[in-house]
Image (cartoon, helix red, strand yellow):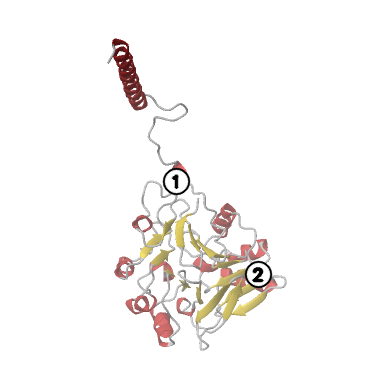
Amino acid sequence: MGESRRDSLEQVRAGRRLRAWSWLLLLAWLVTSCGTEPTPGASSDVALPSEDAGAQDAVDAGTDAGAADTGPDADAAISIDPLVPPASGYAAIFLDVGQGDATLIVASTGETLLIDGGVSSSLLGKRLARLGVTRIDMIVATHADADHITGLADVLADYEVGTIVWNGVKKGTQIFDDFLAAANAEPGAKVLIGRRGDTLTLGNLTLEVLHPGSGADTSDDHNNQSVVLQTGCAGAWLLMPGDAEAPAETEMIGANVLSDVDVLHVAHHGSSSGTGTALLAKVQPEVAVISAGAENAYGHPDADVIERLEGVGATIWRTDVGWDDDSLWMHADCKGGLQFGRVP
């Protein structure tokens, strides 16, 4: 081979070696620069969850987070509107009215039902105003005790209520007289006495009256003459027993009107006089809601009731966590989805 040919080959090989080294150097530079400098416009900080994301005290029923209800974000603001239930579902708001009961049911079609009115008109009014309630279509007064009906006369004065249901058992108190007078004076309202077998319609919801039976007496045993309601849908059957105690539970079991439910609003604020083992064996709730006042004088809820609820595996939510508003909301999509959270 001639000298010129060898020189040409050496030049070609030298060029190839130069290009190879150039590519290696470029690659090394790229690796080094990517490891030391952030991409323009990108943050070098670790992404942290937003306050709202961590604050969502809305959990599927039965999870540890929902059961504890004591985490650092338990009272933080949430983005879900308690009054807006899922489409074709419903919402329930268990209002913190101190040592009393008041629960708002909202159909997906917008109709509302208020079950009981707590022991304070002003406190009930504050809770409804905080939620932004603009309509109440139906009222159920489970029985005539003051901690269940005190706020109802003012509600009847402030809202156009179309249907009013009570148990028909009178009580000789001014609070009861005021409620009944307001009910009878409500323009255009139907005033009904609820009895076992009756059904009520609230938008897309049907409510069944399970108690009292047709033979309800007019004695002073007001708790055991409470109107007991059941409503709901797939994965979200809700039992609302007022202040029903052991005698009423026994009667309902004997009448075979109780069935498996998903959520139990625990009777009589968790008093030891109710929520017996026989009732729990029948209804088997996954979630139990207890309405009671913080540090109340009655010791509600009773430790034995809590133990019985835990024994059937129920997640427990309470309105007596503290002195602020501990109201709870529940959303059901009627497809098996069920969420709970604190009202913001």
Q: Give the mark nearer the N terminus: 1 vs 2.
A: 1
Is 145 in front, or is 313?
313
Is 269 in front, or is 264?
264
Type of residue at label 2? Ala
At numbered mark 2, what does the secondary structure look like: helix, strand or loop?
Answer: helix
Q: Is residue 220 above or below residue 23?
A: below
Question: In the displayed image of the protein, which residue is found farthest to the left?
Answer: 1
| Left or right of 185 in this view: 230 | left
Q: Quadrant of residue 187?
A: bottom right
**Quarter of the image containing the N terminus?**
top left
Identify which residue is drawn at 43% across, 62% down: 292
Q: Quadrant of residue 246?
A: bottom left
Q: Position of residue 56 (x, y in %)?
A: 44, 50
Is 236 in front, or is 271?
236
Type of residue at label 1? Ala
Question: In the displayed image of the protein, which residue is found farthest to the right?
Answer: 187
Q: Position of residue 275 (x, y in %)?
A: 37, 73
Identify which residue is drawn at 30% across, 12% down: 7
Q: Position of residue 218 (x, y in %)?
A: 52, 83
Q: Is residue 171 visible?
A: no
Q: Which residue is mark 2?
A: 182
Q: Is residue 310 above or below residue 212?
A: above
Q: Which residue is mark 1?
A: 53
